[in-house]
């Protein structure tokens, strides 16, 4: 194909490409031609700092030599084989590493393509598990207020962000919903910390819902520690532990969605590990391949896996064409190598402290309602009536920083 100039590309982009979560009538194209480390380079050669890790994925930045090489090496062998009834060494060894590093008890890995599909299969596994263990009345899911778990209809049913989800209500299935658990400190700077009054308040509401629906709940779905797409809403410390205990008490399954908070974002490999929680199902995605290729996974326990063994009727009839793809698996191996080194490095701790210090300063600004930080996840939440987050992000872009607003919240999620 003939090379095109910038104007031609922009015109085609506006006319042909329907961009995700974008009002196309206002869409102003930003065309990125290359990237390296934390920097994107646009078609004019302008360098732009990637303040959102290309949507919370590029854990190690762009064009990382280790991940590049791992993908090239894998390309020499095989780019794709299905995982329906066959396998290959890289996905097998990746499953082994994921099991070894995941919260205790998660011994089996179901590979998918993106975050939403990992949550969808977690729901289907939970639902079918109860059917196959004789508790046919356990058909409901309990989700958090303001939850976001993806954009497929199952995950939209779980979702509780009116702006994204309300419109589709007539075609969604009903989900039980508790309040949005939120730390309530006096300080405008919110970290992951104790707030016993809030914790007890929210847990009592979830207990009530579990009591009212005793024996009917297939699973409780939680994004642990911080609900990111809700606007980086921090939960009080101990809330996750409390929910895990409630799940045990009411004999239901705990499904954690670590798609945004997992893979090192919070400073530990998985957010659940901050509270020693052992979920029944855990969904991971985004940073799994270091932001290179679409791969996600749902991990589960032997107790659940074994309930699917037997004759054909017990099979999990679910799959995605590219689930467990070897190129993705090779990228994930390389990303995990880097991540394991990074999480134990002093440099990483130093950088998190730097991020914290700078975010703290922003909390003093008159237009800022609050600032949140959990590891390498940060956010500035604006007061009602202050300049719109989108306008601020537009100015940031003019100054060379790419940030993507979420309502009145500006997430800061650097590589
Ligand atoms: C917590 C959480 N779950 C699920 C998803 C959906 O992931 P994907 O966009 O890869 O389908 C996201 C995406 O932002 C997310 O933040």
Image (tube, grey):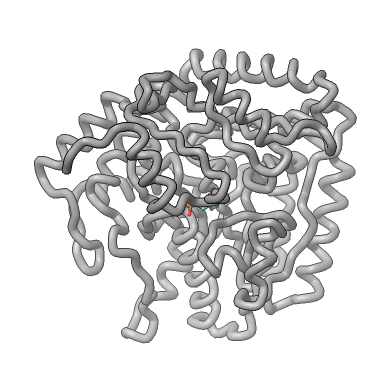
- Where 319 falls versus 245 (above or below)? below
The location of residue 214, given as percent across then percent down, is 74, 76
- Where 174 falls versus 22 (above or below)? below
One can see residue 42 in this view:
yes
Give 130 or 385, whichever is nearer the viewer: 385
The location of residue 335, given as percent across then percent down, is 35, 34
Residue 61 found in image quarter = top left
Residue at 72% from the left image edge and 33% from the top image edge: 192
Residue at 61% from the left image edge and 72% from the top image edge: 218
* Count of all numbered marks drawn on residues in the image: 0
Q: Is residue 37 left or right of residue 402?
A: left
- Where 262 falls versus 113 (above or below)? above
Residue at 51% from the left image edge and 19% from the top image edge: 348
The location of residue 389, given as percent across then percent down, is 69, 35
Residue at 41% from the left image edge and 29% from the top image edge: 339
The location of residue 1, given as percent across then percent down, is 16, 43
Q: Is residue 217 left or right of residue 311?
A: right
Residue 323 found in image quarter = bottom left
One can see residue 248 in this view:
no
Q: Is residue 148 left or right of residue 305?
A: right
Report the residue that reaches farthest toward the left. 76
């Amino acid at each position: 194909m003939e090379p095109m100039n910038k104007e031609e590309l922009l015109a085609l982009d506006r006319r042909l490409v329907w961009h995700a979560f974008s009002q196309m009538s206002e869409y102003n194209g930003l065309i990125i031609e290359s990237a390296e480390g934390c920097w994107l380079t646009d078609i004019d050669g302008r360098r732009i700092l990637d303040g959102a890790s290309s949507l919370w994925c590029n854990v190690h930045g762009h064009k990382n030599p280790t991940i590049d090489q791992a993908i090239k090496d894998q390309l020499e062998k095989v780019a794709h084989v299905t995982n329906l009834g066959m396998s290959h060494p890289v996905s097998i060894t990746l499953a082994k590493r994921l099991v070894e590093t995941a919260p205790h008890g998660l011994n089996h890995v179901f590979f998918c393509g993106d975050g939403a599909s990992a949550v969808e299969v977690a729901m289907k596994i939970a639902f079918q598990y109860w059917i196959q263990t004789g508790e046919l009345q356990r058909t409901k899911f309990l989700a958090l207020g303001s939850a976001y778990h993806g954009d497929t209809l199952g995950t939209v049913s779980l979702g509780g962000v009116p702006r994204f989800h309300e419109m589709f209500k007539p075609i969604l299935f009903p989900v039980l919903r508790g309040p949005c658990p939120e730390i309530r400190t006096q300080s405008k700077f919110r970290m992951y910390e104790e707030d016993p009054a809030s914790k007890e308040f929210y847990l009592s509401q979830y207990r009530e819902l579990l009591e009212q629906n005793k024996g009917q709940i297939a699973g409780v779905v939680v994004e642990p520690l911080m609900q990111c797409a809700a606007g980086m809403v921090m939960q009080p410390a101990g809330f996750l532990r409390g929910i895990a205990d409630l799940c045990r008490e009411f004999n239901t399954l705990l499904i954690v969605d670590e798609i945004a908070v997992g893979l090192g974002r919070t400073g530990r490999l998985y957010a659940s590990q901050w509270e020693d929680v052992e979920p029944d199902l855990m969904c991971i995605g985004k940073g799994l391949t270091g932001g290179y290729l679409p791969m996600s996974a749902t991990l589960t326990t032997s107790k659940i896996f074994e309930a699917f063994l037997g004759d054909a009727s017990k099979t999990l009839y679910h799959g995605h064409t590219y689930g467990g793809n070897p190129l993705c698996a090779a990228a994930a191996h390389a990303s995990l190598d880097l991540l394991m080194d990074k999480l134990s490095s002093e440099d990483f701790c130093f950088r998190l402290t730097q991020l914290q210090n700078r975010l703290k300063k922003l909390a003093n600004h008159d237009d800022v309602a609050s600032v949140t930080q959990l590891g390498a996840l940060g956010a500035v939440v604006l007061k009602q009536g202050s300049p719109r987050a989108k306008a601020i992000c537009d100015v940031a872009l003019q100054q060379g920083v790419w940030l993507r607003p979420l309502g009145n919240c500006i997430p800061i999620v650097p590589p």
